[in-house]
Amino acid sequence: MNNTDDQWVEQHSDLTTRWGSALAERLQRVARYSSLGLLSQADERRFQALCEELHTLSDLIDQFELVREASGESQERS
């Protein structure tokens, strides 16, 4: 790869990481609001539907082994 390709990969990876972090934080915040009963009925239904979809996706990710833990993490969790 040349420098332009390396720069694109670095920028894309950084954006992906930041976007993922933002979504994870938002999901935690919405889960907290749900647990406190602060969501409207419509928002609560959408949140529960999202949770069901994420659970289904999680099962598929496990089934097809799409995510692998970074080296050392599996040992720390054991």
Image: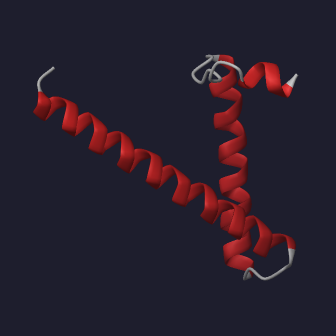
Q: Where's residue 55, x and y in %?
A: 72, 41
Residue 1, relative to residue 17: is it above or below?
A: above
Question: In the visual, does 11 lie left or right of 29?
Answer: left
Residue at point 78%, 83% (across, down) = 38
Residue at point 59%, 24% (across, down) = 67
Task: Please tell me in which quadrant of the rendered image residue 42 appears.
Answer: bottom right
Question: In the visual, does 65 lie left or right of 5?
Answer: right
Quick one: 5 or 67, which is closer to the camera?
5
Q: According to the image, what is the colour scheme of the structure?
A: secondary structure
Quick one: 62 or 40, which is closer to the camera?
62
Q: How many marks?
A: 0
Task: Please tell me in which quadrant of the rendered image residue 35 appears.
Answer: bottom right
Quarter of the figure that contains the N terminus: top left
Task: Please tell me in which quadrant of the rendered image residue 23 appears.
Answer: bottom right
Q: Where's residue 64, x and y in %?
A: 61, 16
Residue at point 71%, 62% (across, down) = 28
Residue at point 72%, 83% (across, down) = 40
Q: Where's residue 31, x and y in %?
A: 76, 65
Q: Where's residue 47, x and y in %?
A: 69, 64
